[in-house]
Image (cartoon, rainbow, N blue to C red):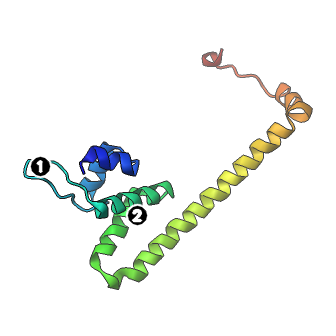
Amino acid sequence: MNIKQASEISGISADTIRYYERIGIIPAIKRSTSGIRNFDDEDLKWLQFSRQMRTAGVSIEALIEYIQLFQMGDQTIDARVHLLNEQKMQLDEKIKSLVNATDRLAYKIDNYQTHMIQTEKNLRPFNNKTFQ
């Protein structure tokens, strides 16, 4: 399949697929004699993996490091697991932060009529003309 089809199936834009290939997050895609990328099922699995890792908040740098370790073979399994654990801990912290933010918003919404309106009336007004 071509890059447009791979993009539609994976949910990753064609530009991002090209970028991922260029920086080594996905393996080099086989090409036709005219240079057109020809994706197969394994390529789609790499795209899916990359998308899942990025959705989980894994940085590009960490993903590149993971792929490099993967390519080195089984002797890097411990390092890969360590890297994934570090990324999971970062994601857990982000989730905790998002839960706190959600709780704060819920509190403001639940108490808007009884507390927030009066609290906001007591705040110092903005003297910034860009808000007027």
From the viewer's side, name the closer residue of 52 and 9.
9
| Rendered residue at 89%/28% (across/down) | 118
Looking at the image, residue 50 sits to the left or right of residue 84; the answer is left
Q: Which residue is mark 2?
A: 62
What's under tag 1, amino acid-wise? Gly
- Tag 2's secondary structure? helix
- 90 lies above or below 111: below
Crowd tier of the residue under label 1, counting other residues whose Cα lies within 10 Å: few below 14, some 14–19, many 20 or above: few
State the separation of the CA atoms marked 1 and 2: 30 Å
Which residue appears at 72% of the width and 47% of the height? 102
Which of the labelled discs sits on residue 74, or is there none?
A: none
Q: Mark number for residue 35?
A: 1
Residue at 80% in and 28% down: 123
Residue 117: % across, % down: 86, 28
Which residue is at 40% across, 63% downward? 62
Q: Residue furthest bottom?
A: 75
Three-letter code, disc 2: Ala
Residue 37 coordinates in the image, percent (x, y): 19, 51
Q: Residue furthest right?
A: 114
Are the residues at dot 1 and dot 2 in contact (C-beta closer than 8 Å)? no
Instruction: For mark 1, give the secondary structure.
Output: loop
Image location of residue 55, percent across then percent down: 49, 54
Residue ranking furthest to the left: 33
Q: In the picture shown, does residue 112 fall above or below 92?
A: above
Most foreground residue, 17 or 124: 17
